[in-house]
Image: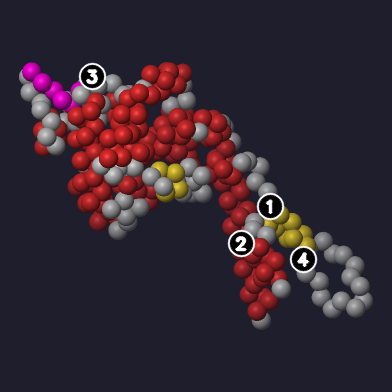
Amino acid sequence: MIAVSVMSLGVFTFDRTDTETPATEVTSEPAVTAVEPNFDLSILDVQFCGDTLPLHHSTVAKRYQTAVRFYDHPSFARSRVGAKKKMKQIETILKKHGIPSDFKYVPYIESAMNGEAVSPRGATGYWQFMPATAQGLGLVVNDQIDERKDLIKSTKAAARYLKWLYNELGDWTLVAAAYNAGPNRIIRHMDKQDKDNYFALRLNGETTKYVYRLVAVKEWVNQPERSSTWAKEGTVTKVMTYMKRKREAADVAQALLLASAR
């Protein structure tokens, strides 16, 4: 049956070249030609906290490529080597609090893993807490002591904050966005736009880039070859061309399925 053969072969096109058929055959089925991507499909298996990024969407793919390229430089490669011990400590603390390990890359984005980092607005330390936020999370911040600079204490505070954000938002990608922009702002955007998907929300420039950069750091650390592919010119075009052909093939399959049912 056509429907069975079509669905079992995945992505394909049809070769309708006329061929001679034996006199005993009444009809002929179109030959099926598989559509093969000209790239490794595993480059689409990019995840954050267990959820796969929708890289089949052009906007998402372009933003992700921009983030990957942002960290494609020797200084970032060197910083990864020096931060391995700290990353282990952070991951252990996050795990104890039930926070996905992907959040261990937040200090890369926030402070370049530098406990002495201070932003123009006064956010300080590995996790870049503002004074009031840090104090609300139980950290000591005064003229003599600033526990935002303490890796262990600040990470425990960050874990508590991330857990609270998840209880409010129920989605780890939105939690990451809220870590950057604040939960109230994210919730306002969700309500106004009637959307609960980070990748579909219209946000300010910094927060729009935030999750992509977080994932890009993770990928450079764990999947450098895949990241190198995404950094190359032409990768997004190849992916979008393949997805277009996949949609077209699905349309043909649906048309044949409907025709066979008549």
The amino acid pointed to by label 2 is Ala
Locate the N terminus and report the quarter of the image it occupies.
bottom right
Q: Position of residue 91 (x, y in %)?
A: 33, 34
Q: Residue at x 41, y 37 (%)?
A: 215
In this view, the residue farthest toward the bottom is 262
Taking the image as drawn, is residue 31 in sight?
A: yes
Residue under the image location 74 percent in, 60 percent down: 32
Please check the rendered image and state whether residue 37 is part of the magenta-colored stretch, yes or no: no
The numbered mark, 3 or 1, whose residue comes first in the sequence reads 1
For the residues labelled 2 and 1, the Cα–Cα distance comes to: 11 Å
Which residue is tagged 3? 116
Camera-side mark, 3 or 2? 3
Residue 11 percent across, percent down from the top left:
64, 56
| Residue that appears at 10% across and 26% down | 141
Distance between the alpha carbons at the discs numbered 3 and 1: 53 Å
Q: Quadrant of residue 229?
A: top right
Residue 46 in the figure: left or right of residue 204: right
The residue beneath circle 1 is: 35
Which amino acid type is shown beneath numbered disc 1?
Val
